[in-house]
Amino acid sequence: MAQTDHFIPSDEIHPIDIAESVAHHHAWDFDRLADDQIAVVIEGQWRSYSLTLAWSAREEVLRLICTFDMDPPEGRMAELYETLNLANDQVWDGGFTYWPAQKLMVWRYGLVLAGDAIASIEQIDAMIGNALDGCERFYPSFQMAAWGNATPEAALDIALGEAYGRA
């Protein structure tokens, strides 16, 4: 993600105000749903991702939910869930779950801002970037587990290989 510390006025300290400024800076489509919630659509390499950031003053948590459509075959759900568990073992921030009723793959993360802590632009930019990176990284694995008849371990091998150097 690009450095974004130069474009937000210092008097905008509400986390959703910051998220809106980050979305505007990156020219992402967004909709401010309420004072404490914003929805963002981001085009990735594999598909479009829908992000929702919501602020809970009571819990002092900024929650990010990043979703994409997925309707796997019923007979492959066990493999998909096992792949999700293996993927979650590989990430430090956030985690995946599947919402079968909505047919959505979900990445969730909560940024705790207890004690009147103020979110920084870099934190919000990084949490959005990490969500997108996780979804882009593991999307092929979920596809292989659901439709490619791969074992969860084989499906995850696709995500774990990282390229080094330059082409």
Image (spheres, rainbow, N blue to C red):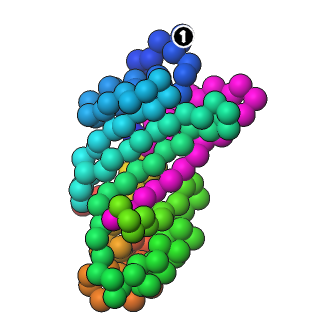
* Nearest to the observer: residue 115 or residue 92: 115
Q: Which residue is labeled 1 in the image?
A: 11
Quadrant in which the C terminus is drawn: bottom left
> Which structural element holds mark 1?
loop
Residue 52, position in %: x, y? 42, 42
Range covered by the magenta-colored residues: 103-128
Quadrant in which the N terminus is drawn: top left
Is any part of residue 138 visible from this angle? no
Residue 118 colored magenta? yes
* Nearest to the observer: residue 76 or residue 133: 76
Give the answer, above or below, for where 13 lies relative to 98: above
Residue 6, position in %: x, y? 44, 18
Give the residue at x 24% y 56%.
Answer: 47
Give the residue at x 45% y 32%.
Answer: 37
Q: Which amino acid does label 1 sit on?
A: Asp
Residue 118, position in %: x, y? 63, 26
Give the answer, above or below, for where 77 lies relative to 49: below
Q: How many labels does the image show?
A: 1
40 relative position to 128: left or right = left
Is any part of residue 132 visible from this angle? yes
Residue 123, position in %: x, y? 54, 36
